[in-house]
Amino acid sequence: MARIVGGITTSHVPAIGGAIAKRRQDEPYWKPFFDGFVPVRKWLSEVKPDVAVVFYNDHGLNFFLDKMPTFAVGAAPEYRNADEGWGIPTLAPLTGHPELSWHVIESLVDDEFDPVTCQEMLIDHAVSLPMALLWPDQPCPLRVIPVCINTVQAPLPSAKRCWKLGQAVARAVQSWPGDEKVLMIGTGGLSHQLDGERAGFINKPFDLEFMRSLIGNPTWATQFSTHQIVEKAGTQGVELLMWLATRAALPGAVTQLHTNYHIPISNTASGLMLMEAAA
Ligand code: DHB
Ligand code: FE
């Protein structure tokens, strides 16, 4: 049976890609952010997961306003990365795991979810940047299954629904007969608002409470409507739904092995968590 080994949640600000390209990791602005990833990479090199399920939100690259799935699951042999306009370097294609992808999709449909299935799927900075942060010196050695959650166009899935999606993904993985070690990754957030009157809005007390809740009281954020999350975390802060789905995909209690929170990176409160699942 496949085993869920843990979860990593991180922000995915495009400027990170520029900082990597220009080797700015040790500059005072960037160091507190990049240093956060050192213990996470150490854990990855010890645990050596085989597969990553990546909960992310597309930003208008693979899906646009004309066709916007609420949930979409990749079932492709590889996922090409492209830049939707930030001018950041792209990654080599990530390798997929179509057999496990289809198992997850079948299990989700049995579980009354209706995802769009993608045998071709372009991935944007929300996937490429976490990979570049977690595997800076080599292409990501894991096979990946991207799970896309709409945060672009209303109506968005509720926090409660994203929680249930994460739980259903965990059930799917745990019923896979293979012996893969599976890592859950969630990318987005934390609080940020890129446009409008509140552009630059960051809510540190809310972010820290949300991060704490994922360990001790993980359904805490499911009490909030989408509008309440926008109010508390900013328009694009709704990306924290990826963190919630990731936590829900870790069955039972988790151990927090590492956390980092740094304000701001670009317009965003950048957060990072490493949670180990119970054996
Ligand atoms: C920024 C943050 C994001 O999550 C994103 O997708 C794009 C830009 C930012 O803070 O610049
Ligand atoms: Fe984003």
Image (cartoon, grey):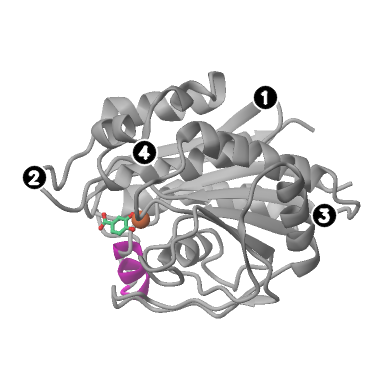
Q: Which residue is mark 2?
A: 197
The span shown in magenta is 15-22
4 vs 2, front mark: 2
The image shows residue 28, relative to residue 203, as above or below, that is: below
Task: Point out which mark residue 261 bears.
Answer: 4
The reply to whether the C-beta atoms of the residues labelled 1 and 3 are less than 8 Å apart is: no
Q: Which residue is mark 1?
A: 253
| Nearest the eye: 277 or 251 | 251
Amino acid under disc 2: Glu
Q: Is residue 81 left or right of residue 44?
A: left
Amino acid under disc 3: Glu
Dot 2 or dot 3: first in sequence order is 3
Residue 137 drawn at (x, y percent): 55, 71
Report how far apart the C-alphas of labels 4 and 1 lie in the structure.
22 Å
Dot 4 or dot 2: first in sequence order is 2
The quarter holding residue 272 reads top left
Amino acid under disc 4: Tyr
Q: Is residue 164 left or right of residue 86?
A: right
**Label 2 SS:** loop
Dot 1 or dot 3: first in sequence order is 3
Residue 26 drawn at (x, y percent): 32, 59
Image label count: 4
Mark 3 neighbour class, 10 Å CA radius: few under 14, some 14 to 19, many 20 or more: some
Dot 4 or dot 1: first in sequence order is 1
Q: Is mark 3 within 8 Å of ligand 2?
A: no
2 vs 1, front mark: 2
Report how far apart the C-alphas of labels 4 and 2 lie in the structure.
25 Å
- Give the residue at x 25% y 40%: 234
The image shows residue 229, relative to residue 3, as above or below, that is: above
